[in-house]
Amino acid sequence: MEILSGLPSVTLLYSGLALILIFFCLWYLRRVTVKEVSPVSNTYTPLPDGAYDVCIVGAGPAGSVTAYFAARAGLRVLLVEKKKFPRQKICGDAVCTQAQDIMEQMESATGKGSVLDEILREGKGHAAVNGGLVSPSGYSYIGSSVGEENSGKLARSAVIAIKRIVLDEKLARSAAHAGAHLVEEMSVEDARFDADGSLWEIRGEHASGSSGTTSFYARVLVCAGRCTIASRDASGHSERSTSGDMLPCLR
Ligand SMILES: Cc1cc2nc3c(=O)[nH]c(=O)nc-3n(C[C@H](O)[C@H](O)[C@H](O)COP(=O)(O)OP(=O)(O)OC[C@H]3O[C@@H](n4cnc5c(N)ncnc54)[C@H](O)[C@@H]3O)c2cc1C
């Protein structure tokens, strides 16, 4: 009986201790979290008028998607393309599920749904339900990406075929709609880092060749696509940059 009557007070004691421990853990975690997310001081000087946070050379899918999300994040974005849209490009035109997901997140230039929705609505995307391979000796694997519930197959087509003359323009216009400044028919030939201004000077030539050279200024330079540019950093070092390079502000 004594043991039984002592139970509530022991339980109370343990509950109290547990509460104190929980409060201590929460207090400690909050300190750690606050420490981790405390903002890093911005040492950049304000952007001069007309300069961009980021300049992206090449408005293929890589450049346009980068431009879209950078613009949506509030950055001043310049997207330079040497061709004029709509432009044709050699490709198998297959758009995989990961790419479809990204296109679903991008608002179309008309503002009527996502880029993917618009392409499908216009009948310009063709879902490939079956696919596979056949070897020269006749071995084959042909499967379907769309399957029964719980079969492990996708609930949608793994690939949608979209002609690049359609896809690339939709993505570029979507980026412009999101706030990126799209400049077509401008070929970037040279970029130079200006250490004093902490900016890249990006020199573009008009495709027609008639209007001479135009300079743009940006903190970060992204070379998207198979373009090749010559760049010089503050020390005068010269190099060739190709697809996928991001050249940050060097300060
Ligand atoms: C035959 C073939 C079939 C393919 N099939 C498929 C497929 O079915 N599915 C798939 O996902 N991928 C396929 N690919 C690959 C796909 O085409 C590329 O991976 C894709 O185009 C790369 O996109 P990107 O934006 O990096 O470059 P790109 O699409 O090449 O875009 C680069 C852009 O930069 C511009 N540019 C270049 N230089 C400059 C400059 N100096 N100044 C300004 N602009 C410049 C170009 O005009 C172009 O618009 C295929 C490729 C080939 C060759």
Image (cartoon, helix red, strand yellow):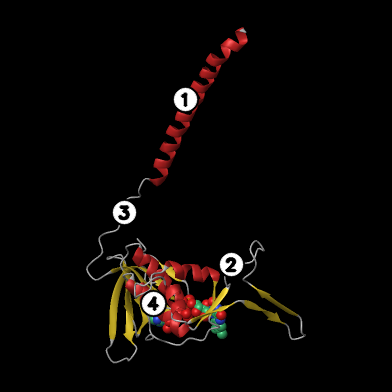
Q: Nearer the viewer, residue 104 or 58?
A: 104
Q: Is residue 166 left or right of residue 75?
A: right
Question: How many other residues sit within 10 Å of disc 2, few (<14), some (14-19) or many (≥20)?
Answer: few
Disc 2, SS = loop
- Residue named by callout 4: 172
- Viewer-nearest of labels 3 and 2? 2
- Viewer-nearest of labels 3 and 1? 1
Work out whether 46 lies above or below 38. Answer: below
The answer to the question of whether label 3 and label 4 lie on touching residues, with beta carbons closer than 8 A, is no
Q: How many badges with numbers are in the image?
A: 4
Looking at the image, tell me whether mark 3 or mark 2 is earlier in sequence order: 3
Q: Percent from the top left, x then y, of residue 103?
A: 45, 71
Instruction: Residue 212: tell me if it is visible.
Output: yes
Gap between marks 1 and 4 measured at Cα: 56 Å
Looking at the image, tell me whether mark 1 or mark 4 is earlier in sequence order: 1
Gap between marks 2 and 1 measured at Cα: 49 Å
- Viewer-nearest of labels 3 and 4? 4
- Viewer-nearest of labels 4 and 2? 2
- Viewer-nearest of labels 2 and 1? 2
- Residue named by callout 3: 42
Tag 2: residue type?
A: Ala
- Residue named by callout 1: 20
Looking at the image, tell me whether mark 3 or mark 4 is earlier in sequence order: 3
Gap between marks 3 and 4 measured at Cα: 30 Å
Gap between marks 3 and 2 measured at Cα: 45 Å
Quarter residue 158 falls in: bottom right
Q: Residue lying furthest front in this view?
A: 149
